[in-house]
Amino acid sequence: MPHLLTLCGSLRQGSTNRALLDACEALCPPGLSIRHYRGLGQLPLFNPDLSDCAPPAVLDLQAKVAAANGLLIACPEYARGIPGAFKNALDWLVASEQFPGKPVALFNASPRASHAQAALRLVLDTLSARIVEGASVTVNLLSKGMTAGDIVADATLAETLDAALRHFHRAIKEGHCP
């Protein structure tokens, strides 16, 4: 069964982006599974000198990304860009042989996070990711304090996420990425 790996760009405990990704697990269509990567805060600062002998936290990230059929990313915007911790994680994936061509769906929790989304797309394009546009969505969770359960219970949000996940699942199964 294909599985998606979620990557949350926020380290914040009560992150809206984390709630969004957790809601996706509850809304996951049959025949697809979702696993969450939660080691962002344990990654050391990127150092290309360590590429040949990467620390265990980096090897764990790389192995999880390699094993996933697709990546589901939700990332906040800090100072009009990608948070440093998340950019650091992406930097550790630059030399990954398994990353090029990896299908990616971008879930954006705030319509105002357009600068981070643009920066994220640029980095992912550099990494040769295959962004699946029909599976990438923006929802307005800004300042709403919603939990994953609240998101699942909201019919409009649940329908939007369900449609995006189903599109992503089809794209991966049929090899139509993007």
Image (cartoon, grey):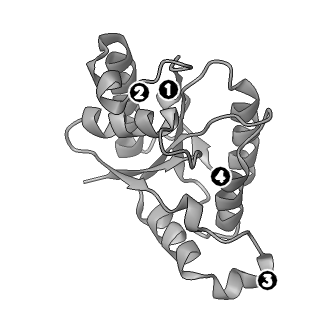
Q: Amino acid at mark 1?
A: Gly
Q: Residues within 10 Å of mark 3 (few under 14, many from 20)?
A: few
User: For the residues marked 3 and 2, what is the alpha-carbon distance in whole angstroms?
Assistant: 39 Å
Q: Residue at x 34, y 44 (%)?
A: 173
User: CB under 8 Å between callouts 2 and 1?
Assistant: yes
Of label 3 and label 4, which has the lower sequence position? 3
Which of the pair 78/70 is nearer the observer? 78
**To which residue does mark 1 refer?**
134
Of label 1 and label 4, which has the lower sequence position? 4
Q: Amino acid at mark 2?
A: Ala
Residue 23 sits above or below residue 2 on the image? above
**To which residue does mark 4 refer?**
86
**To which residue does mark 3 refer?**
49
- Whole-percent x, y for residue 59 in the image: 54, 76
Residue 104 sits above or below residue 109 on the image? below
**Which mark is nearer the camera, 3 or 4?**
4
User: For the residues marked 2 and 4, what is the alpha-carbon distance in whole angstroms?
Assistant: 23 Å
Q: Amino acid at mark 4?
A: Phe
**To which residue does mark 2 refer?**
164
Of label 2 and label 1, which has the lower sequence position? 1
